[in-house]
Amino acid sequence: MSTPFYVSPQQAMADRAEYARKGIARGRSLVVLQYADGIVFVGENPSRALHKFSEIYDRIGFAAAGKYNEYENLRIGGVRYADLRGYTYDRDDVTARGLANVYAQTLGTIFSSAAEKPYEVELVVAEVGAGPDGDQIYRLPHDGSIVDEHGSVAVGGNAEQISTFLDQRHRDGMSLAEALKLAVQALSREANGNEREIPAERLEVAVLDRTRPQQRKFKRIVGRQLTRLLDADGAGATPTDAPSDTEEPEGGSTAAAGTDTPAKKGTDTPAKKGTDTPAKGTDAPEKDADGPTEGTGEAPKE
């Protein structure tokens, strides 16, 4: 019986960390940014059913990069923890810091265990507060450590380059449109320095909006609202909810048609002469405009 090779604990941990990092690097990056009214999650995701972002509780959002089946198990576990704690104690007792601690224990236990491979995931747990000072963003790498982030954070394959780009350009008090455009610009940058275009249909965007009247602050931004924010002029654009999607058809060609049609009827009908039908429907306007001189019947002569 041959003796197995000895591997030091330091080397074993380094190998497991390298394995996890390579798995995370194969996934698409995502960014989480603070803006004036909350926190926005932006990532490239061509799938409409397999989400990178989701709601955990009233004010808490979840983002993940890496293997979908692994971070989906973590997401479900976080939802169960939050529901149980909120039901047992109080809804205010469910916080992003408490959830991050639970995730850190789980990831740390799996990473240090020799019985199974480490999870190839990197998580972000965010909580929106009553004001910008109350916002909390925590990044959890594969080894279970917790990093308290401020302003912006990027995870995934090209996270270091994206984080550098965001740190140089992100500022406090940005509007939703400005933060969204900055996130798309950061995600569009490739490792070789080139930029590529990411269409709106390949983006997954969600927000924790503190201005929402509902208790649940998480909301996905899709469709025409997402396109409108990407095409906005920056500071002049204000985030809008679903009712804004119907402003264009209601205030566009329909209103114009409602004003043009009566004008045509009011001007065309009196101009026709020798017809009896328009004269019956518009007696008063014809008498006022034309008078007895243009009448051809007996009534105008009297």
Image (cartoon, rainbow, N blue to C red):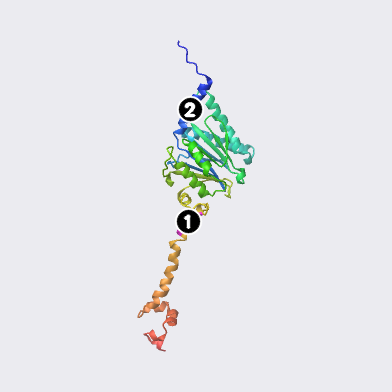
Q: Circles 2 and 1: CB distance less than 8 Å?
A: no
Callout 1: 10 Å neighbours few (<14), some, many (20+)?
Answer: few
> Residue 264, percent across and down?
41, 71
Q: Quadrant of the N terminus?
A: top left
Residue 247 magenta-drawn?
yes
**Between 186 and 243, which is closer to the camera in this rendering?**
186
Query: Does label 2 or label 1 sit earlier along the sequence?
Result: 2
Residue 24 horizontal side relative to residue 56, left or right: left
Residue at 45% across, 44% down: 203
Q: Quadrant of the C terminus?
A: bottom left
User: Is residue 102 visible to the viewer in this orientation of the structure?
Assistant: yes
Q: Main secondary structure of the magenta part?
A: helix
Disc number for residue 181: none
Q: Secondary structure at mark 1?
A: helix
Residue receiving disc 2:
18
Vertical relation: 57 (above or below) 113: below
**Between 43 and 157, which is closer to the camera in this rendering?**
157
> Residue 44, percent across and down?
45, 41
Residue 53 magenta-drawn?
no
> Residue 18, percent across and down?
48, 27
Vertical relation: 128 (above or below) 115: below
Callout 2, which amino acid?
A: Glu
User: Separation of disc 2 and disc 1 at Cα?
Assistant: 50 Å
User: Is residue 52 visible to the viewer in this orientation of the structure?
Assistant: no
Residue 90 horizontal side relative to residue 245, left or right: right
Callout 1, which amino acid?
A: Thr
Q: Which residues are magenta?
A: 243-249
Disc number for residue 246: 1
Callout 2: 10 Å neighbours few (<14), some, many (20+)?
Answer: few
